[in-house]
Every structure is written in C-alpha cells, then in structure tokens.
Amino acid sequence: MSRGRQPPLVTGISPNEGIPWTKVTIRGENLGTGPADLIGLSICGHNCLLTAQWMSASKIVCRVGPAKDDKGEIIVTTKSGGPGTSTVSFKLLKTEKIGILDQSAVWVDEMNYYDMRTDKNKSISPLSLRPANPLGIDTDKVKVAQMDLESMFPSMSGDFTSENFSATWYLIENHSTTSFEQLRVAANNLRKQANKKNEGSLAYVKGGLSTFFEAQDALSAIHQKLEVDGTEKVEGSMTQRLEKILNRASDTADTLFQEVLGRKDKADSTRNALNVLQRFKFLFNLPLNIERNIQKGDYDVVINDYEKAKSLFGNTEVQVFRKVYAEVETRIGSLRALLLDKLLETPSTLHDQKRYIRYLSDLHASGDPAWQCIVAQHHWILQLMQTCKESFIQRLKGGADGMTLDSDGELRPSGIGRLGHSASFKSGSTKSWTPQGPQQVSFVEKLADVVTGQLPNFWKLWISYVNGSLFSETGEKSGQVEKLKKNARQRQSDFKKMIEEVTHRLVKLVRGALLPSSLTPTELQLYGGWEAQSKLSGPSLTQIIHTVRGSHEALAALEIPNDLLQVIQELLSDLRVHCLMVTLKQVAEDVKQLPEKEDWVVDNEGVTSLPARFEQHMVQMLQSLKGPMDCKPGEVNIFQLERTQDEASELCVWIMKVFINCLEQLSTKTDADVDASQSVHEDYRPSPEQRLLLILSNCHYLEKHTFLNLAEHFERHGFLGTEKITRVSVESVRALDARLFESYVERKADPIVGSLEPGIYAGYFDWRDCSPPTGVRNYLKEALVNIITVHAEVFTVSKELVPRVVSRIVEAVAEEMSRLMQCVSSFSRNGALQARLEICALRDAVQFYLTEESDASFKQALEALPQLHNGADKKLVEELLNKFKSSMHLQLTCFQPPSIQPLKR
C-alpha cells in the first residue's frame, strides 16, 4: 500500500536526558495528522505510546519509560507516513531510589519496599536505608587484618555511620587500589550529595516543578469547563461534589497511612535519640573517662578531652549538656589541685616539674604555677642546706636526733616528708656511718653536693620560665604564653634575690664551720656550732678549697651572672689566706720537732741530715700550697694583698727562726739528753764540742745553700718579700753561728792558752838565768799537739771550718805569748835566744793560719825580746829551728796550706 505522506522525522527532544517517567517534548516533521494517525512511539527501545499526547504535526509530549538501553533514538510511527527516523538521541539516567519516608512529586512504585517491610525473615533498621556506598563508585575490598587497622587508628572506626569514623580507615579497607581519577569522581559525588542535602525542600520543589504545572493546568481546565457549563444541580455544583470526593479521599488516605506515619514519628524520635547518644556519648562518658585517666596518669589524654569538650560545650544552652559539662569542670578542678600538689612536692625532677607546669598551663590554672614551683624549690634548697648543717652538729654532740645517714653516706632528716627521694639525700635503709676525715671537710662536701645537685635544675627551671619553653614544647607563641613570659621578666629581681640567698647561705654555712671569726654573733648562732671541733690542717683546708672551687665552676658553667657568685669568690679568697696561714703555722710547729730526728750522722760536706730535712719540709709545704695558692679564673692573687703578704713573710721568718732556735737547743743538750734520743746512731755519740762543730757546719750550710734554695722556691710559688725572709734568716743564723763559734773556740783555746804560762816556767825557769838553748821546750810542742788535735777534730766534721777555727786558736795562743813576753822584765842572752826560738817555731808552724791579729801578736812578742847582734846567735837559732821542724815534720804536716782560706766573720 502506498503512503501519501513523508515518514516522521524527529529533530529535537527536551530534555535530552532524564530518569524513567521523565516528561519530554518531541519536535520534528510529519509527526502525524492527528492523535489517531499516531500508532507508535519508542524512546531508547521502550514503547511510550501509552503516555503520548499528539499536539501537532511537529510536537508530541510523552513520558519516558524504564528502557533497558541507557541511550537510544526516538522513533515515531504514523499511519500516513510509517516508521520514522531521528537525528537526536535521549540519555536515560539511573533511577535514584526513594525511601518510603522520602518526599516525591511523582507516584512511586512501592512494590519493592512493601515486600521488604512485610517479609518476616528480613529485619530492617532505619539506618539501613542509608546508601551502602557513599562514594558512588565501585568498591575493591582488599583483605586487611582488623588488628592492624585498630593499632594504626586507635579509638577510630571504618564505619561511616560511627561518630569516630576515620576516612583513611574506610579508604584503606574499601578503595586501596582505586585509581586517583575514580577518587576524584567519588569526591564530586560527595559534593553533589552535600549540595542536594543543603537544598532540602527547594530541591524537591524544583524536581517536581513540571508536576505542579500539570496540576495547575488541570485545575485551570476544570475551572474553565465549569464556567462554560454554568449549571448547578440540586445536590450542588461539580466543585462541591469534587471537594467532597477529595475530602473523602484525604480521610481514606489518612486512615490508611496513620499507622505508618505514627511509626514514622516514633522511628524519627528513636533515631534522633540514638543520634544524640551516639553523637554526644563523648560528653556523657567524659567524667568517668577523666577519672580513669587520672588514676592511670594519662594527663595528656585528659587535657585533650577537656579542650575538645570545652570548645564544643563550653557555651552550650542545652541544660543536659550544661549539667554534664559542670561535672567535667569539677573533675578538672580536682585535677588542677592534684597537679599543683605534685608540682610543689619536693624533691622532684626537672622533667616532672616542666611536665606538671605545662599541664597546669594547658588547663588554664589560676595564678602562676611555674613561679609557685620556683618559690617551693628555693625554700627546699635552703632547707636542705640548713638540715645538712644541723645533722652534722647533732652528730658532733653525740646524738643524731631526727637525723639519719643512709647506706650511701647521704644525710637524711627523718622528720621531713618525702626527703628520701632527693637526688642529694637518697633514701635507703639507715645505718651508722662515720665520715672519713674531719667533720668540717665532710660537711662542706655534703653541702656542696646539695648546692650543685639542686641549683642547676633550679636555674634551668628559671631559664625555661623566662623564655617560655616551660609552657610550650613547640615554642608556639600564644597570648597566654606571652603573658606568662612577661610575668617572668617582671620577677627577675625576685629570682636574683633567691640566688643570692642560696649563695649567701652556702658561704655563711662554710664560714661558720671554718672561719667563725668572719661572722657576727647573730650569724654564729645560726650558722656556727663547730666550736668543739679542732682546727683543720692545711691539707684539709686544701681539700675544702678544691670542693668550693668545684661548686663555683659548676655554677659558673650554668652562666649564672658573676655578681651573684662574687660572694663565693670572696669566700675562696678568705679560705686561701686561711689555708696559707694555717699551713705556715703548722710547719712552724712541725719544725720544732725536727731536733728529735737529728741522728748526728755527717755527710761528705760535713752536714747532718737536719738542714736537708728542714729544706724538704719547707718544699713539701710549698708544694702543698701550690693548688690553693694558684689563681683560677676570677680569683685574686692573695700574695698581692698587702696584709697577707706581710703576715706570710712574718710567718716564714718565724719558721726560719724556729729552726735556728732548734739548732741552738741542740748545741746546749747534755750527753744524757743526747743518749735519750732514739735518733742517734748506735755507734756514734758526739761530744758537746763535736755537736757544736756539727751545728756550726749546719749553720754554714744553711747560709750558703738552704736559705738560698728556699728563696728560689718561695719566688717560684709566688711568695713576695723573699729578700726580707732571706736577709733576716741569714742574720739570725750568723748570730747563732757567732755565739756557737765563740763557745767552741773558748772551749778549745782556753786549755791551750792556759797551759802556756805553766809550761814556760816549769822547773823554776827564769829568763834572766837560764842555760843556752838546745831546742824548743816541750810546753810548746804540747801546745802544737793540742792545736793539731783541734785541727783533726774540726777536719773530721768539716774541712771548711778548719781554717776558721785553727786561725782563731792561733790568735789566742799568739796573744798569750805576746802577753807573757811583755810581762818579762828582762832577758839574759840565753833567755832571749830561747824565747826567740820558741816564738819563731810557733809562728812558723802555724804560719798558714796566721791572721792580721795573730801576726801582730807575734811581732809584739818578738819586739819585747832583745835584738840579736851577732851572726852566731842567729845561726844558732836557725839551726835549732830547723832541728825542731825536722823532728816534728809529721805533726806539722797538718798545718800545710789548706785548700780553703780562713773564713772572715
């Protein structure tokens, strides 16, 4: 059959995409001559003829059905033109499910939902209506151990309906292999869902706008038809009947859905209650969690939870929340008090103090906890120092009431709570303990341990307080931190006074134990109490100086200003001076004991061991003073202090005089005293004259060697005024030498001189009536032998003393001979020859020991004799003189020229 018209052609459709049952308008050419001519209409393969409305040959309106194809053509079929073609296509979107309680502008097929609700074997909760895939993309679950996820995300969940939902957990569990592009699509889906949710009812109205327009058109058409009809029957107009029908339909609908709506309201209220509990369970559980975390010591968790609750519910108007939050504030107030108690508890480590201060700062505690901690630590350090002193004083008195010393040798007062945990006062089982060495030394060491153990942390706490690191580990600058730093800067003068009080307390306690005379009577009552202790020796004071220096260096290393440590420097200066004086006085006392160690054994130089012992003692003393006297950085040279210099010089001179006095005491010892000395060599018992010689030799050695050596040592160790020390020492030893020399010469010369006159006149010898001389008489030979005996005795001790001693004896003999010759009234010829022979024999024998005095005496003696006038007399005298020298050659050998000339004093 031939057709008289062209086939239909679709050239446009609006909209060109939509979900099933979307109303569309189709435009084109040859779309039919009327409704009866339209016999077919398909969109995307679905027959839409049932809903089609033919408007004109170029326009058709219909609804899109649930087609299988997502995109397809629009085919119109007419009787007159047959099946047509299409130049456009329509995209069918997926239908979004509408819940049974969701609003909808179109009629919804309830079949699936009805079956779901009435199926006895399937239970459903309101939350199950939420989308199972919120991202709107395919999931690719990878098996991940649940325990690993829980360890990675503690207290979190991968369930997006949970309050503790973790997006990272959800992505790892459901989209670990999803590409980045897919994740971007998912992000766009989330944005669309959020926008749709925000639009609310407005979006619902927009979505059903065409339905409202259709309803409006239908009502307008009814109204127009009624106006055209214009007739009313007895039972009422059409509108009235329609109103009644609609009212009955409404009542019937209410009856049908009242139970459903009731359950909906109840489900909404239950859901809301569950949501509230789920959403705000953090707040409701917070008081109990705070209590548990406080007991466990997890203060960080408590503070974080409190900050979170404060930001969420701090200004809430909900009564229930306000009540719970008030309970939270009560628990936090108790925590503040607990942390403050722990902060002020002593002893405590610096780490704990900083931690508690930060906690209190995060909890916005009232006041300034950091400054309170500093004040508490200051009192604690002062208390430790005073307790240390009181413990030692109690021990000195014989009873340590309330004081104990632990197993490590540390002091611990039992009456002070929590003292046993101190870094300096360790806890432990107590037992009796006796410190080694003097009590004052142990006390200073313990006191220094207290200061160096506590003050560094105290200073570091202050530095952290000033720079703000005490309140924030990250150094962030918040208003509160800046305010606290400003408060710290305002308290610098107060903290300086605290440091001064600690250093002054340290100095006064040390002065009370070592330098009580430097304190006032009032200060002595507080810091003294050591009167019963004996004076300390130089080594003990040296040890104390070392301890105090160590404390000063430890505090200076903290960069504490020097003006705060100046008082310790002054203490060190006084201790060094005191150590010097005590050491010098102790050496003087020790020198007094040296004579007891004299063994009278002579060395090659004719000196006993006593000068060497004395020099060794002095050198050891100077070496022991090297440490205390050396100037450390910041210390003064105490030898440059005029008063110290004078006192040290006087003490050094005193030590020299003490030793010289010891030598003089040795010279006056009796034989019994010498025998009583245990130091004397068993085979050697010196006579008094020999002791004098030995001491004379020692004096000579002191003057020529020992004093000069000591002067060098004094200068090398920084002593000033060594010239005075040496000069006074030499003067003193020379004075002693002179006294001892006169005593020895007197002892040796007097017998020789006294034997001359009796020997000359033995046998009633008369110068005026005597026989011709035949040789030197025996008295003179005996005198020479006696001189030789003295020579031998002196030479045995010290050959350096021989010229000095023999010369002096010769002077005495010559003087006596001169006196005797001058006393003779007249000489015979023979008497004159005899006298000249003897005087010349004596003079020639000792000619190498003649001095000006002795030579003058011999000249005077010869001048008193008559002069020889003939050669025979001279020859006789010469022959007899040679005979004398020949016969006594062996004895006269000792009078040969010595290697050392006579000493002039």
Image: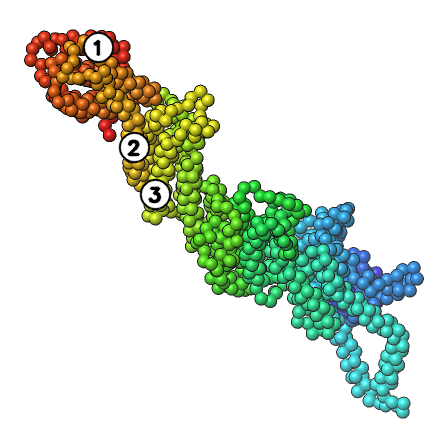
Taking depth in this image into account, of 856 and 500 the one nearest to the observer is 856
Q: Secondary structure at mark 1?
A: helix
Q: Secondary structure at mark 2?
A: helix
Badge 2 amino acid: Arg
From the viewer's perspective, is residue 389 above or below residue 286?
above
Q: Residue at x 69, y 56 (%)?
A: 298
x, y percent for residue 849: 22, 20
Q: Residue at x 26, y 18 (%)?
A: 783
Mark 2, residue position:
739
Indicate the quadrant containing the C terminus: top left, top right, bottom left or bottom right. Answer: top left
Q: In the image as oriented, which residue stretches furthest toward the left?
A: 869
Quick check: 722 left or right of 846? right
x, y percent for residue 362: 61, 61
Q: Mark 1 or mark 2: which comes first in sequence?
A: 2
x, y percent for residue 51: 82, 68
Q: Residues within 10 Å of mark 3 (few under 14, many from 20)?
A: some
Q: Secondary structure at mark 3?
A: helix
From the viewer's perspective, is residue 745 above or below residue 176?
above
Residue 885's mark?
Answer: 1
Q: Residues within 10 Å of mark 2 (few under 14, many from 20)?
A: few
Badge 1 amino acid: Lys
Q: Residue at x 21, y 17 (%)?
A: 764
Residue 650's mark?
Answer: 3
Q: Nearer the viewer, mark 1 or mark 3?
A: 1
Q: Mark 3 or mark 2: which comes first in sequence?
A: 3
Quick check: 307 left or right of 886? right
